[in-house]
């Protein structure tokens, strides 16, 4: 049986701005507008991907993929 990898992130609801913000690391976050369904992946302050209204199962899979990418990115550090 293969090694089980666990991913985690924090989630904050900014209801005043209709946002759900998932933070994966200092460098990676996902913002979801809970009113419009617009989703943005932000890496190092830049929007690198946009989505709109995915199904719940697809959104969960998407977040796991972002978590995997964030873990890889953190292993490279900040390029300093």
Image (tube, helix red, strand yellow):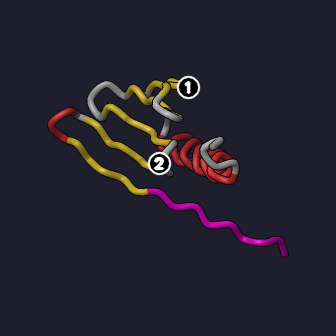
Residue 67 location (% of width, % of height): 58, 50
**Quadrant housing the C terminus:** top right
State how far apart marks 1 and 2 are (Cα). 15 Å
Q: Residue at x 62, y 51 (%)?
A: 74
Residue 10 location (% of width, % of height): 40, 56
SS for dot 1: strand
Q: Residue at x 19, y 41 (%)?
A: 15
11 horizontally vs 71: left or right: left
Above or below, 9 against 42 in this view is below
Residue 48 is tagged as 1
Above or below, 29 against 74 in this view is above
Residue 79 location (% of width, % of height): 65, 41
Q: Residue at x 51, y 43 (%)?
A: 27
**Disc 1 crowd, CA 10 A, few/some/many (<14, 14-19, 20+):** few
Which of the two residues, 58 or 8, is positioned nearer the viewer here? Answer: 8
65 horizontally vs 46: left or right: right
Q: What residue span does the magenta drawing correspond to?
A: 1-9
- Magenta residue check for 18: no
Residue 26 is tagged as 2
Q: Main secondary structure of the magenta part?
A: loop
**Quadrant housing the N terminus:** bottom right
Q: Residue furthest front?
A: 80
Q: Quadrant of residue 32?
A: top left
């Amino acid at each position: 049986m293969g090694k089980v990898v666990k991913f985690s992130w924090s989630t904050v609801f900014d209801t005043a701005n209709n946002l759900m913000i998932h933070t994966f690391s200092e460098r990676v976050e996902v913002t979801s507008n809970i009113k419009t369904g617009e989703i943005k992946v932000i890496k190092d302050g830049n929007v690198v991907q946009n989505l709109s209204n995915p199904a719940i199962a697809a959104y969960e899979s998407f977040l796991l993929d972002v978590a995997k990418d964030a873990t890889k990115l953190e292993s490279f550090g900040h390029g300093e």
